[in-house]
Image (cartoon, rainbow, N blue to C red):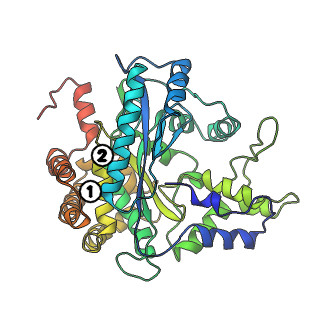
Amino acid sequence: MSDSVSDCTEQGSVVTEAEVEALVRGICFKTGPPRTLGVELEWLVHDLRDPRLPASPEHLEAAYAALRTLPLSSALTIEPGGQLELSSAPAASLMEVIGSVSADLDAVRAVLREAGLVLSGFGHDPWHPPRRYLHEPRYEAMERCLDRAGPEGRAMMCSSASVQVCLDAGYEEPGPLGFGRRWWLAHQLGAVLVAAFAHSPVVRGRATGWRSTRQSLWAAMDPGRTSAPVMDGDPRAVWARHVLDAPVMCVRADEGPWGVPEGMSFRAWTRSADPPTSADLGYHLTTLFPPVRPRGHLELRMIDAQPGEDGWIVPLAVTAALFEDPEAAEVAYRTVKPLVERAGSLPAPCNPLWIAAARSGLADPELREAAAVCFEAAAEALPRLGAGTDVLKAVAEFTDRYVARGRCPADDLLDLLHGKDIRT
């Protein structure tokens, strides 16, 4: 869904520390009855004949130019490594999201097919090393900043892809659909979603030891940028503090390379002789990559891209059911609550629970048990949300193939790598 943060900050006016806190509190959690749903789909783009063959920048540019002429209902953007992203408009129902995005994907795939290219649903590119396609000042600065912590940043930028589910923040009042409960649930249920939908176990043709290598990258990067805030109070106050204390990635410039300060928090910037503007705040918010990002709505960022043309529908449907249906939300809350002790005091994705989810997927017994309960609750809730027969069938098939067996899509890739038959 569209980035409401940048739309809600006035351009050009200098902001104080107190004003930043007030702005963040006001724009990042827009409460009210949950009515809309969205999804953001990132895809790797590979050669149609052989996905192990890299597509040249010139090949991608020609194809993307053709895509930009399509009358899509979703926003189409290109990620730093040439990944393609479709971001749906906010929709009034699950089936509306699925219908509009599926139609857009059909149109996009037809153009790419003509160009000899194909969309691939992997959480991390299994074959190719990171290669940056976009050479804009933002990504030059991002690369310089992330390189300070290690190679994981470049891999995240250029080789990863995800299914991001966007949910309304929820009611102001407490309860299963209250914004406080939904904020908490997103961070605890997130580990179950990581484990169930892990699909990035192979890099450069070799197993990494992680079911979700993509999630391992986030855990290894700068925690000030990629970790969730400590869950110790009102979500608005917690997030505002986190935004102020997060490191500044870059300082934009009208000409030449952007500045990349080292060790300067946004709070420190507001106290400097050359403080930031509200536009700088809006931009700073887009450079934070926690597993759950409040942007007026909640953006759940922890799910790997999925196999198959329609594999993205299952995590969207399951996640929507567990948040939008009050009965399912209550079951999910009770199911993941015992996992909090295992997570410990560290925030996601760096705590032991999230690390286990990324490393083991549903081979972890506790996560497998929690996933089984949550998927059953989602299956019961989906008809109440108006889900169609095809969606119910897809969720049931995924449950039988993976959740009931303590497996995830990553296990299929590992079996293929080791020459095993995965047809059953």
Vertical order, 59 against 396 (above or below): above
Give the amino acid type for the residue marked by disc 1 in the picture.
Leu
Visible residue check, residue 196: no
Nearer-the-camera pick, 326 or 358: 326
Vertical order, 98 against 232 (above or below): above
Residue at image location 61% in from the left, 72% down from the top: 25
Vertical order, 159 against 337 (above or below): above
Spot occupied by residue 177 in the image (x, y as percentages of width and height): 37, 75
Place residue 351 in its image quadrant.
bottom left
Q: Which mark is residue 62?
A: none
Task: Tell me the CA gap for discs 2 and 1.
Answer: 9 Å
Residue at image location 30% in from the left, 48% down from the top: 313
As helix, strand or loop, the secondary structure at mark 2 comes to: helix
Place residue 216 in its image quadrant.
top left
> What is the tally of numbered marks visible in this picture?
2
Spot occupied by residue 35 in the image (x, y as percentages of width and height): 40, 68
Place residue 121 in its image quadrant.
top left
With 420 as the anchor, is 134 left or right in this view? right
Question: Crowdedness of circle 2 by 10 Å Cα count: few (<14), some, many (20+)?
Answer: many
Could you tell me which quadrant the C terminus lies in? top left
With 314 as the anchor, is 222 left or right in this view? right
Report the residue marked by disc 2.
360
Report the residue marked by disc 1.
367
Spot occupied by residue 376 in the image (x, y as percentages of width and height): 18, 61
Give the amino acid type for the residue marked by disc 2 in the picture.
Ser
